[in-house]
Image: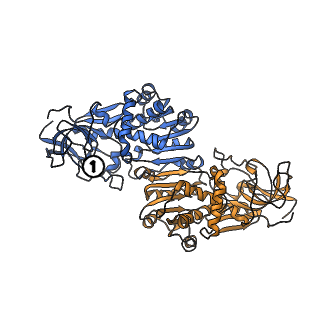
Chain colours: A blue, B orange
Amino acid sequence: MSQTTNRQWRLARRPVGMVSESDFEYREEPLPRPSDGELLVRNLYISFDPAMRGWMEDRKSYIPPVGIGDVMRASGVGQVVESKLAGFAPGDFVQGLFGWQEWTVAGSGLRAPQKLAPGTPLTWHLGVLGLTGLTAYFGLLDLGKPKAGETVLVSGAAGATGSVVAQIAKHVVGCRVVGIAGGREKCAWLTRDLGLDAAIDYKQGDVQRRVGELCPQGVHVYFDNVGGEILDAALFHIAERARIVLCGGISGYNEKEPPPGPRNLMNLVTRRGRMEGFIVIDYAARFAEAAKELAGWAKAGKIQHREDLQHGIENAPRTFLRLFRGENTGKQLLQVGEPPIRV
Amino acid sequence: MSQTTNRQWRLARRPVGMVSESDFEYREEPLPRPSDGELLVRNLYISFDPAMRGWMEDRKSYIPPVGIGDVMRASGVGQVVESKLAGFAPGDFVQGLFGWQEWTVAGSGLRAPQKLAPGTPLTWHLGVLGLTGLTAYFGLLDLGKPKAGETVLVSGAAGATGSVVAQIAKHVVGCRVVGIAGGREKCAWLTRDLGLDAAIDYKQGDVQRRVGELCPQGVHVYFDNVGGEILDAALFHIAERARIVLCGGISGYNEKEPPPGPRNLMNLVTRRGRMEGFIVIDYAARFAEAAKELAGWAKAGKIQHREDLQHGIENAPRTFLRLFRGENTGKQLLQVGEPPIRV
């Protein structure tokens, strides 16, 4: 680690199909200097989320695409080294869209920093108390509206968001919860450690049959992180007035064109189902309230979480690819600095 | 027409793929006799609806399938000839699931009769004031929730339900309304006679491009009667917080297995859209209120409707097939008796 060089990754080109390391360009830039109204932040942890794949596409969405040649966008937690922004002082821990780099000049707009309150492990702000946990919270509770005793099915259940969804449904709301994940080890974590009622290993095939067996009352709430065939399997088994929460569709993010949608869509008609998408930033006004509740559940042991911590800015593209290979269990993070650092 | 024979069509076998006339069996049965609690009804008009195709499949749905060998189920309007049911007298006009036949013994359950109030043309009870109009009313207003100035896109817009949806959206709510239909004649009817803002002839190709051109603000409400590629085209152009009302998917009803769903489903996430299905019978408690409002709009000329009237019970299967060939404009009916009849 150098204190005079900012190692970073920029978007080299728009990926076609599966994202690869060569879609990014490694650069060593001089240490940036903050102007008035800005901070110099030393980044500590970078967050990796499937939604970042969408930011690489040149299309209209809820946030502008990352420009070719721009530092790759990502949430991160860091420490203020130099402040020209009122309300922030050196040593403060902050969070923001700081990108794939060791140092960030953060000010307003997309790179606006938020100060972190002490008393919580830093990485929690990128996971269970961050956008990941908030996505689980609002998607499940506001859109899914599960009731005690209903059956909740979650895909990507060993992922950062899915694991929080599943645990809120099970241990806070009191639902029967079935998680879908890839591999025995992840499934064992879901049932043994997180206490879900059952887990389905999609790599063992015939997810549709297994959903039918494990959800005899039908699926009242399906929280979808993956799309594709698993969404179809869930639709096949929806209960009357089911709520399908579309959070993401990682199975299609690296396809050259969007894959075909679910064949069983018309079950929404015959069973009066609802399917709804959402973007968590729309709930910003309620983040503080929700984060407080999530922190309480985490401290009470109702929500456990796992972090998959990789190391070194040089590994940023590789760490990102872990998401699409299903290699992570829990929140995918990259540590790029040692806290606390001396300023 | 014989007064001693009941000409009828029964379901001969479950269709595989496109329904055909040979899936039904023609029968001449003796005139049935009502028992206590039943009526003998002389049928006058039979209603044909795409949803009837679903009733022929042996699968769990909102209503039991028509059994092999049973008279094909359909809504109809008729006149009471003999009554052993309190509250009904010979000469009364009644409505119910009377089936593809000239005479029906109607009592309780699925064949329960409803008495029709005088003062309205009989066929309106199968169309604009019947389940067709009610489907349009509740689907558009309760699920679609259009606001004045928003853009509403309707597929199957020259059909019985779609034409009512389009006119409520345009002339009651005050939306910009674009209809999709097959053929120049239907499209001309939509814009010239019904006063829609624009019409798209799907037989002229590239529906997706045309939707984009004609809905520059995006599609706020899409009322889907057809599914398939047209649903996909609509999803491509949804506005933020769009509501997609799934009423039916006629394009897939005659497929051996459900066709693939829409590729653009993930736009529900990035644009926070909602897609919801419904079954109109769930709104039965509000039918009277809605029918009254529909009747007012129809009498005020805000809702025009067309009927495609075929004749003779011998033509029932052929009339049904008109729906799937897109041959009908407006409500598909079959007249099987001359009102009023002498009893």
Judging by the rendered image, the residue that carries numbered circle 1 is A110
Task: Farthest residue to the top: give it.
Answer: A192
* Residue at image point 29% right, 36% down: A333
Locate residue B337: give its quadrant: bottom right
Quadrant in the picture for the C terminus of chain B: bottom right
- Percent x, y for residue B162? 58, 62
Quadrant in the picture for the N terminus of chain B: bottom right
Task: Establish if A134 lies above or below A199.
Answer: below
* Residue at image point 47% right, 51% down: A260
Task: Farthest residue to the front: give it.
Answer: A87
* In the displayed structure image, the side of residue A327 where residue B152 appears, left or right: right
Q: Residues within 10 Å of mark 1 (few under 14, many from 20)?
A: few
* Residue at image point 44% right, 48% down: A277
- Percent x, y for residue B88? 81, 55
- Percent x, y for residue B38? 82, 50
Residue B202 visible somewhere in the drawing: no
- Percent x, y for residue B67? 72, 47
Secondary element at tag 1: helix
* In the displayed structure image, the side of residue B253 where residue A115 appears, left or right: left
* Closest to the observer, A245 or B94: B94
Output the chain of dot 1.
A
* In the displayed structure image, the side of residue B207 where residue A125 appears, left or right: left
Task: Establish if B270 lies above or below A125.
Answer: below
Residue B17 visible somewhere in the drawing: yes
* Closest to the observer, B216 or B287: B287
Task: Establish if B168 lies above or below A304.
Answer: below
